[in-house]
Image: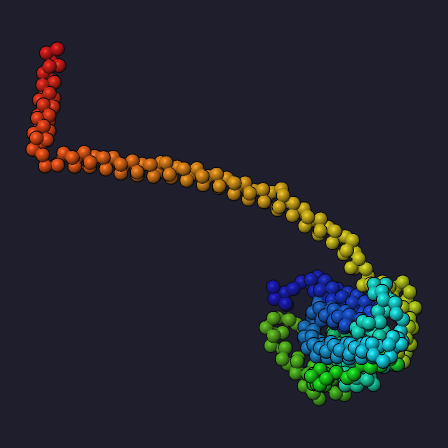
């Protein structure tokens, strides 16, 4: 069906899935220590934003956020790779010196317990943000471009592309009177700004918490130049979709994306409302973005001391662990779905290899072998026998006839006499039978 023909119930369900995904993944992201996991669950959350926008009919806003998100999230992932690369080099530097003149005197600033699953620190993990801190001074190009990408993800007002696309989705939810979608996405936006500042604080601010962070070098130009090339797009790309009704600057820059989408929207028969401007979604967008960044900065702006427990973990207690362990979805999967799948696979193995499939195939094979022996014997003794027998008869007949034509006159006379005798006998036989 065409987009304009989709039932309202279907679109509401799509909006629910998107909004739930946005808030669900953002709560997981606030409690991760792995720098890439934060970004991974952030990506899931932002995809939820886009799906929710589709559900409320904000197709242009969904595409807008897809485009801007692609740039600033690429910047963040590439930046995290640069950070990991730098910390890894810091580890190599520390280990080289530890095995050199200093022996084993070098020790990590942080704790040395290696136990990943319960949340304790692995001091050799270059992706764990607790092994970082203070990297902005060590890796300035990586750090500042990462901060630009983080501000765009947070929706920092006016200056970043993420603000314009995310604000467009929130405004569409408000104008469409989908208030539950609006407030759910607003909450997710607050959490997004918070966990982004948490990530920036743990990674780049404060003092280094490990010797690896102290000795982390800036990445090579082949890694940092792409960051500097993408960073301007994380700022300026939002200008392609500034709504015309936005205060002061609306209409100064043409809404290129909306004009680009208009023919498609008209072709699909989608009705797009153009309501009057309201300050509520704009102010909400400003408050959640700046508020989330501010709360994150208050808690993590000075970084953490080496070995310090995450303040959020202390504040939330068991709820933090619920977020950190992804609502125990993995454990639920491991204890419910995985045993079922394994049991089903074993059952299918027995069906395939032991009970049904393989026995049938083997039986057909054995029958085929026995039939092949039968048909081989039939071919040898019947088909070949008939052909060979006819040939032998023809050969013997030919031999007899050949002997009768050997050129001896007496043989010809004998054959003639015998033939005449047989003919006379046959001619006289009916007369004899009549007399009898």
Counting from the top left corner in percent of width and height, residue 250 is at: 73, 85
Q: Give the vertical position of 180 relative to 338 (above or below).
A: below
Identified at 37% across, 36% down, the residue is: 381
Between 52 and 381, the one lying in front of the other is 381
| Quarter occupied by residue 424 | top left
Name the image colouring. Answer: rainbow
Between 121 and 147, the one lying in front of the other is 121
Between 187 and 204, the one lying in front of the other is 204
Q: Give the vertical position of 159 relative to 429 (above or below).
A: below
Residue reaching furthest top?
Answer: 436
Identified at 85% across, 65% down, the residue is: 115
Identified at 78% across, 79% down, the residue is: 89
Q: Name the quadrant of the N terminus.
A: bottom right
| Quarter occupied by residue 38 | bottom right
Counting from the top left corner in percent of width and height, residue 324 is at: 83, 65
Residue 295 appearing in the image: no
Q: How many marks?
A: 0
Residue 169 appearing in the image: yes
Counting from the top left corner in percent of width and height, residue 223 is at: 71, 82
Identified at 91% across, 76% down, the residue is: 305
Q: Name the quadrant of the C terminus.
A: top left
Counting from the top left corner in percent of width and height, residue 52 is at: 73, 68
Q: Give the vertical position of 348 relative to 131 (above or below).
A: above
Q: Report whether 112 appears left or right of 161.
A: right
């Amino acid at each position: 069906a065409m987009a304009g023909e989709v039932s309202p119930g279907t679109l509401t369900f799509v909006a629910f899935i998107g909004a739930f995904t946005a808030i669900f993944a953002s709560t997981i992201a606030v409690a991760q220590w792995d720098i890439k996991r934060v970004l991974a669950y952030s990506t899931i959350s932002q995809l939820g934003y886009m799906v929710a926008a589709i559900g409320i009919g904000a197709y242009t806003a969904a595409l807008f956020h897809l485009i801007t998100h692609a740039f600033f999230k690429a910047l963040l992932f590439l930046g995290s790779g640069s950070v990991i690369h730098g910390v890894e080099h810091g580890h190599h530097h520390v280990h080289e010196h530890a095995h050199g003149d200093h022996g084993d005197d070098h020790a990590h600033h942080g704790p040395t317990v290696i136990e990943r699953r319960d949340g304790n620190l692995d001091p050799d993990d270059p992706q764990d943000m607790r092994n970082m801190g203070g990297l902005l001074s060590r890796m300035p190009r990586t750090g500042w471009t990462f901060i630009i990408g983080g501000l765009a993800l947070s929706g920092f007002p006016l200056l970043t592309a993420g603000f314009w696309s995310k604000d467009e989705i929130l405004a569409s939810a408000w104008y469409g009177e989908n208030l539950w979608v609006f407030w759910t996405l607003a909450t997710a936006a607050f959490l997004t700004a918070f966990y982004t500042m948490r990530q920036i604080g743990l990674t780049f601010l404060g003092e280094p918490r490990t010797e690896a962070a102290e000795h982390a070098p800036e990445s090579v130009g082949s890694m940092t130049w792409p960051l500097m090339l993408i960073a301007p797009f994380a700022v300026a790309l939002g200008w392609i979709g500034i709504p015309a009704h936005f205060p002061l600057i609306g209409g100064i820059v043409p809404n290129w994306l909306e004009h680009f989408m208009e023919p498609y929207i008209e072709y699909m028969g989608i009705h797009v409302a153009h309501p009057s401007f309201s300050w509520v979604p704009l102010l909400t967008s400003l408050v959640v973005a700046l508020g989330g960044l501010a709360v994150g900065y208050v808690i993590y702006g000075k970084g953490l001391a080496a070995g310090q427990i995450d303040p959020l973990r202390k504040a939330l207690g068991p709820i933090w662990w619920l977020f950190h362990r992804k609502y125990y979805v993995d454990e639920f999967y491991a204890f419910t779905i995985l045993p079922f799948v394994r049991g089903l696979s074993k059952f299918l193995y027995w069906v395939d290899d032991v009970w049904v499939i393989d026995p049938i195939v083997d039986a057909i094979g054995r029958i085929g072998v026995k039939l092949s022996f039968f048909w081989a014997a039939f071919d040898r003794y019947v088909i070949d026998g008939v052909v060979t027998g006819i040939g032998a008869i023809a050969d013997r007949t030919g031999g007899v006839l050949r002997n009768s034509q050997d050129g001896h006159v007496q043989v010809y006379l004998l054959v003639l006499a015998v033939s005449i005798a047989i003919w006379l006998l046959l001619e006289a036989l009916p007369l004899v039978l009549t007399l009898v």
